[in-house]
Amino acid sequence: MAKRFTDTQIWEKEWFMKLSPKHKCLWRYITERCDQAGVWEPNYALASLYIGETVTPVDMKILDSHVEVLPSGKVFIPDFINFQYGQLSEKSPAHKPVFRAIIKNSLSNRVFNRVSNTLQEKEEYKEEEEVKEKEEEGDLTKSIFSDEIFIDRLKVTHPGKDLHQAWNECYTHHSNAPNPPKEEWLWKQKLNTWLTIKKLPEGKKDKPNKYKINA
């Protein structure tokens, strides 16, 4: 029995909410009866039997923003492949039937251009996020090291330790954690803790900590 992902949020989407019960059923029927490429070969008599209401080609116009009638008369769901499989890979045995269905329906140019564009958009988004993260790190670093009182306390409490190196290590570690600090004062606490457990460079001896920092 074939199993597919389903969009559990579809009931809150405005376009779906506006559909009649018949067309809601028709949409679900098409998404579940289409092939691996998201192509449904219409059988309106059978669809009508399952849905309980008469379905004709005219009903496709109600769904025209989410389906496309191909020259062959088959109905194609453009977003189906990306939603079900994400990035296709010829090395994946599970994707081989998808490639066969794409070729069978003469959709190679359509699908692979669409996937390529999607991947490019993801890469561009990733680059933008990386730039944004670097800017946020720079602003946070500048703010923390501009706090002269805090930095002076760190120097007294952790003599001989490289504050900037410790900060880079601390930020890299905690920014990649599941719940990174959101406030500057929390980052200061993390830095103080990191310095506490950080060993001095070889050849230097640690001095007793006579001070306690309240970041």
Image (spheres, helix red, strand yellow):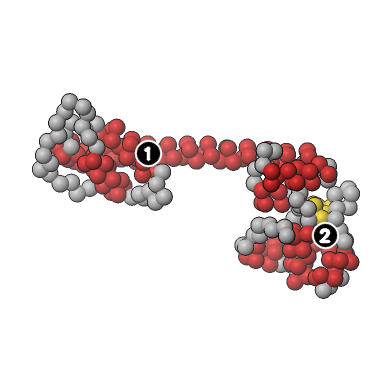
Q: Amino acid at mark 1?
A: Thr
Quote the CA–CA distance across marks 2 and 1.
Answer: 52 Å
Residue 27 appears in view: no
Residue at 39% x, 51% y is 179
Q: Secondary structure at mark 1?
A: helix
Residue at 18% x, 37% y is 158
Q: Which residue is mark 2?
A: 61
Q: Which mark is residue 73?
A: none
Q: Residue 114 at what x, y percent from top left?
A: 71, 41
Q: Amino acid at mark 2?
A: Lys
Q: Secondary structure at mark 2?
A: helix
Q: Mark 2 vs mark 1: which is more N-terminal? A: 2
* Towards the viewer: 44 or 150: 44
Residue at 75% x, 46% y is 97
* Towards the viewer: 69 or 176: 176
Q: Which mark is residue 172?
A: 1
The quarter in which the N terminus is drawn is bottom right
Q: With 182 as the anchor, is 132 left or right in this view?
A: right
